[in-house]
Image (cartoon, rainbow, N blue to C red):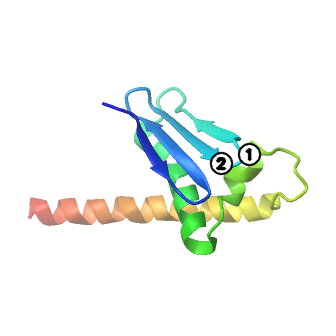
Amino acid sequence: MQPVYIVLDHATLYLDLEGAYFRTMFNDGTCVEARPNGDEEATLFWLHDFLHSVLAEATHSAPSPTLWAVAHPGAPDNISTDAQWAEEGRVCQMQIEGARGMLRTLERVGD
């Protein structure tokens, strides 16, 4: 399977499903790379970083401030750790809601 590129306003996302590899590259050329460790499920892993970027673009037309801080350690304009955890919470909630929706669909199919 060919790698997938998703171009957003503030970042380009690169997904290699065969290599279980996901990269968020910001417009300034810096990037955050995500690979699952050990037994982590690759899909959940890359989906998490994907949601960071999509959520940020949709809610405030900017790059994910959490991923930006990871790519720019120590930058004075980075958001606080508390704000990063708040974004993490929103992304995790989106993943949980997505999983619940899939389970509801599977339950209906099984009926």
**Residue positioned 54% across, 32% down in the render:** 35
The residue lying toward the viewer, choosing from 11 and 103, is: 11
Q: Which residue lies furthest to the left in this view?
A: 111
Select label 1 or label 2 by which is in front: 2
Mark 1 Cα shell of 10 Å, populated few (<14), some (14-19), many (≥20): some
Dot placed on the residue nearer the N-terminal end, 1 or 2: 2
Q: Quadrant of the N terminus?
A: top left
Residue tagged 1:
70
**Horizontal placement of 52 versus 40: left or right?**
right
**Residue positioned 70% across, 55% down in the render:** 66
**Residue positioned 48% across, 64% down in the render:** 94
Q: Which residue lies furthest to the bottom in this view?
A: 59
Q: Quadrant of residue 105?
A: bottom left
**Horizontal placement of 1 versus 20: left or right?**
left
* Residue type (three-letter) at the residue carrying disc 1: Val
Q: Is mark 1 on a helix, strand or loop?
A: helix
* Residue type (three-letter) at the residue carrying disc 2: Phe
The residue lying toward the viewer, choosing from 52 and 103, is: 52
* Residue 38 x %, y %: 51, 26
Residue tagged 2:
26
